[in-house]
Structure formats: structure tokens, C-alpha cells
Amino acid sequence: MKPLGSRFLSSGRRAAVLSRLPPTDPFALPKIDSGYLSPAADLAPMVAAALQVRKVAAQPALAPFIAKELEPGCEIRREDELRDWIRGSMFSGKHPVGTCRMGSDYAAVVDPQLRVRGVEKLRVVDASVKPTIIGGNTNASTIMIAEKAADLICAAKREGEAPWLNAIFGSGRI
């Protein structure tokens, strides 16, 4: 008998990733707060969804297929216990983006050519340049960013805007 399961994920669209280093220990790991469920409104629909899954799983037609509830488990009955379980088992199925946001405004870390503002000869070419998380998997759009970056770098070399690239790619045509 295969287990019947469900996973609950917050949209994350309102959550911010914060990281800070303790001021007294430069070798301490940064604290990363994903902000999951920080808006109280995110938790209520997740509790409702968990209760609905339980209601559906309790239907007689599913009885031959369900031996027992695996998560959160039959010992968790009250809504406050369910909220605690959801908070404790929360994880992200998405990849963080936006830490080096691309844009034309003063707050953007990189410009539309993926160049880091105020730093010469440095581009950021990964998912961190996306201003916000996309609705799907980040892989395809990250590949597109890398392909665009390759085009931008090759064009800069061809147009003589980046003679230092010869040290990396040689003086041949790219």
C-alpha cells in the first residue's frame, strides 16, 4: 500500500529573506530568516487545507487505500497543534531569487546588462538577478539569463568595450 501524502507550501511572495551576521563574531554563520508564515494570513489557509485533506482521506471510498495518516499523524488533532506542526515542517520548494536584483532604478544591484553597479569587470549571472520569484521552476529562466549574459559578454568583446576579456578568451573571435 502506497502512502497518501500532501505537502503545504506558502506562496512566499510576501516573505523576505533576511540574513545578518552577529556583530561580535565574524566567523559565525549568518542567520537566515525566510519569513515563511510571517504574515498570519498565510497560516489559516494551510490549516484549512490540512483539515480538508483529512476530511477527504476519511471518506469510505478511500479506506482500502489508506492504512494510516503519516503526517502530521493521528496524535495531532487540535488546530493549535496542527498550526505548530505546519510551522515546524515548513520547507521551500522554490529557489531564492532577488538577492542581486537587476533593474534600472537606484536600488538595483545589477544593470540590465548584468553588470554590478559601481564595480568594473563584474557581472552576476544566476537566479539572484531576478527581481521576484517566478511562478514556475527557476531553471529555464536562469538558463535564459546565462545565455543572454554570454551574448552580452561576446558583444562587449567584439565591440572592443572589454579588452580585458582577451586575457580570458584570447584574441580570437567569439
Image: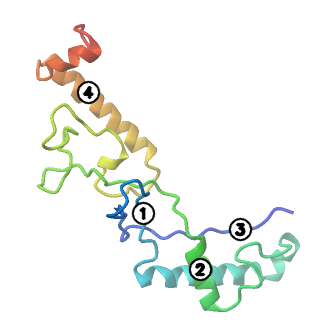
Relative depth, front residue between 68 and 170: 170
How far across and down, in percent of the image, does residue 86 sit? Answer: 59, 77
Q: Earlier in the sequence, mark 3 or mark 2?
A: 3
Distance, label 4 to label 1, CA atoms, is: 34 Å
Quarter containing the C terminus: top left
| Side of 2 where 107 appears, left or right | left
Residue denoted by label 2: 49
What is the three-letter code of the residue carrying label 3?
Gly
Distance, label 3 to label 1, CA atoms, is: 28 Å
Residue denoted by label 4: 151
Distance, label 3 to label 4, CA atoms, is: 44 Å
Q: Are marks 2 and 4 in contact (CB under 8 Å)?
A: no
Relative depth, front residue between 145 and 34: 34
Q: How many residues crowd around disc 2 within 10 Å: few (fewer than 14), some, or many (20 or more)?
A: some
Q: Earlier in the sequence, mark 4 or mark 1?
A: 1
Distance, label 3 to label 2, CA atoms, is: 13 Å
| Side of 103 where 134 appears, left or right | right
Which residue is at 31% across, 54% downward?
99
What is the three-letter code of the residue carrying label 4?
Asp
Residue 117 sits in quarter:
top left
Q: How many residues crowd around disc 3 within 10 Å: few (fewer than 14), some, or many (20 or more)?
A: few
Residue denoted by label 1: 32
Which residue is at 20% across, 49% downward?
109
Distance, label 2 to label 4, CA atoms, is: 46 Å
